[in-house]
Amino acid sequence: MPTRRGFLRIAGSSAVILAAGSGTFALTRTPAHALAPWAMAGDTDLYTDPRVRALSYAILAPNPHNQQPWLVDLNEPDTVTLYCDLERRLPETDPFDRQILIGLGCFLELARLAAAEDRRLVELTSFPDDQPGERLDHRPIARLKFGPEGSADPDPLFTHVRERRSLKEPFDLDKPLAQETLLALQSVVPEALHSGFNLSAALRAELRTLSWQAHLVEVTTHRTNMESVNLMRIGKAEINANPDGIDIGGTALLDGLTLVGLLNRA
Ligand SMILES: Cc1cc2nc3c(=O)[nH]c(=O)nc-3n(C[C@H](O)[C@H](O)[C@H](O)COP(=O)(O)O)c2cc1C
């Protein structure tokens, strides 16, 4: 690891740090105010460097088990080099680093959207030092080259960046997806992704069964289940102390059960 100097805080707490000047540093959300980075993102007084401004949105990205595995190097002017914090991978639930890479992709996409809001084009080179093998390694995930002001137009998706949170509540399985919602989704997904959208009930049932079976494998395999359990933050105090991991609760009921010792990891 390079020396840690030239720190630049991008949020109120010491847990949120960005590389400036020299080295590679971890970015994570603040313990004391788990939600503060959502309010501080894009603050032009705090973040005068357009790269840091864009990154202040990127750190809000969804990512598996909320491990926030991003490391950035800002040494090169107008450039952000993104690495994966290899310690933050999930060897049991994500043995091929597939999910962690999706989270890093979300980070990159948010950085791109935020830079476009600043009217800066981001040129992305993925795996600039060649692709990893079976698992990620110390080589960069991507290099982002920031263009001058005026090189890009804002993207309408940016409006939704701060509205986004993972919904961890039961879905109404009988409520059909409206055709116009589907069309709206389709309209913002670049064709290059080769993604498909489908309203077929049969396909939905098939995918539901497959997902449930996968879930059962994960939760009935002890080492895999424990990786998730160990990363659970149960109740408000734990969530505030460690706003990474899987948050369970913050509700009065769960907090109460935790306080009286009725709810714990075991
Ligand atoms: C590839 C990927 C896999 C995820 N898997 C799960 C999961 O299995 N269970 C879960 O509750 N959340 C999952 N999440 C959501 C993250 O836990 C969530 O994004 C993270 O805790 C941050 O919370 P937020 O999305 O509300 O900001 C996943 C996210 C990504 C990108």
Image: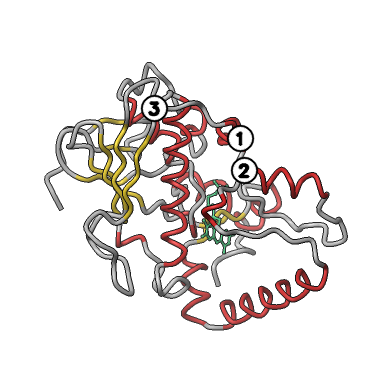
Mark 1 — residue? 160
- The numbered mark, 1 or 2, whose residue comes first in the sequence reads 1
Q: Real-space Cα distance between discs 2 and 3?
A: 20 Å
Q: Callout 3 environment at 10 Å: few (<14), some (14 to 19), or many (20+)?
A: many
Ligand 1, seen in the image, is in the quarter at bottom right
Asked if labels 1 and 3 touch by Cβ distance under 8 angstroms, the answer is no
Q: Real-space Cα distance between discs 3 and 1?
A: 19 Å
Asked if labels 3 and 2 touch by Cβ distance under 8 angstroms, the answer is no
Mark 2 — residue? 188
Residue nearer the viewer, 81 or 11 = 81
Residue that protrudes farthest toward the top in the picture? 45
Q: Is mark 3 within 8 Å of ligand 1?
A: no
- The numbered mark, 3 or 1, whose residue comes first in the sequence reads 3
Residue nearer the viewer, 204 or 231 = 204
Residue at point 37%, 34% (across, down): 13
Residue that protrudes farthest toward the right in the picture? 174
